[in-house]
Amino acid sequence: MGTPDFALPCLVGMLKAGYTVNAVITQPDRPKGRHNIVEYSNIKKKAIEHDIPVLQPEKIRKKEWVDIISKIGCDLVVTCAFGQILPKSILDIPTYGTINVHASLLPKYRGASPMQRAIIEGETVTGVTTMLTDAGMDTGDMLLKMETEITKEDDICSLHDRLSMMGANLLIDTIRLYEQDKITPIKQDADKATYAPMIKKEEGRLDFNQESYRLYNLVRAFNPWPGTFTTYCGKLMKVIKAEYSEDDYDKNVANGTVIAIDRDMMSVKCQKGILHITELQFEDKKRMPLCQCGHNMTCGIVLGGC
């Protein structure tokens, strides 16, 4: 069970390892892009390529879907970023339970957006965890973990790709050990749990009353979606790439003020430090580096202030 590209390596890994996949269960097809064209997810395409039946329940807890899945029959269910919490009626179907691949080092960052939240919070280490799924939200007993560093050069795209491959490898290791009864589930410490709620578009609005480092993390975590943005003289301005410095600036200057523009960056005063915007995009325009548009911009403008 999985929907986004993050889940694809898990399916590919299971097929390469020789496991029989009786069905792929994924979210219903959704319209995408400006023209609202309905496209199959990559995991659905891969299932079709291998002649695997595809099920797409809007709400998996409905009895009709429970009955359909029960009739398929399976020894084990694997979930990875499926997008719906499984009810007990589904969890009771597989003979040996359900294994979930989660993109954090549980119990930290339970929920829908663990990778983005880890970047935003300035974590330097994250990873993937395999766990036995229960009726809660990422609360089941842990099986295996694998760690990786989050570097300052990482963004959500690079971290996503790395963790998705790690998750697939960890899943195969987990299944093999689980089959041989060589793995001991470990309960999560609920007191150490943190949460990664679903991202809302408004979270991408840059608030220059925050530290430059946090805004830099937001840019890394939220591009390409939902994107980070502000306004320049009333026009929507998306911030695609940025750097930061911890240099202090005149406290009498308003936060959000453009304090310098050179060939490669626009420097903006924050509550603490300076955000250096290196690539941006105005509404209905192409994204572009500062070297292509900085000459049309003015120092002293307060971003988000008009």
Image: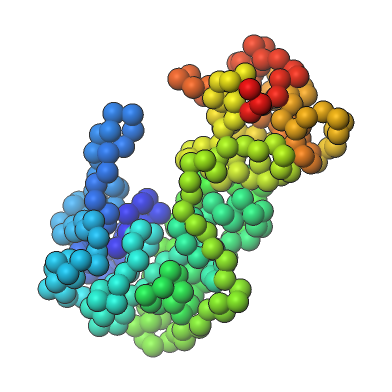
Query: What is the quadrant of the N terminus in the image?
Result: bottom left
Q: Nearer the viewer, residue 131 or 35?
A: 35
Q: How is the image coloured?
A: rainbow
Q: How many marks?
A: 0
Considering every residue shown, the one lying at the far front of the view is 306
Q: Position of residue 301 (x, y in %)?
A: 71, 20
Placement of 202 over or under 252, stated as above or below = below
Considering every residue shown, the one lying at the far top of the view is 296
Residue 257 image-quadrant placement: top right
Residue 47 image-quadrant placement: bottom left
Q: Residue at x 57, y 71 (%)?
A: 193
Placement of 208 over or under 128, stated as above or below = above
Residue 69 appears in the figure: no
Placement of 254 over or under 125, stated as above or below = above
Placement of 43 over or under 288, stated as above or below = below
Q: Residue at x 67, y 12 (%)?
A: 295
Residue 152 appears in the figure: yes
Q: Residue at x 48, y 77 (%)?
A: 142
Q: Position of residue 242 (x, y in %)?
A: 65, 34
Q: Position of residue 256 (x, y in %)?
A: 71, 30
Q: Position of residue 161 (x, y in %)?
A: 47, 51
Q: Is residue 259 left or right of residue 169?
A: right
Q: Residue at x 58, y 61 (%)?
A: 126
Query: What is the quadrant of the C terminus in the image?
Result: top right
Q: Is residue 75 left or right of residue 272?
A: left
Q: Nearer the viewer, residue 249 or 42?
A: 249
Q: Is residue 193 left or right of residue 35?
A: right
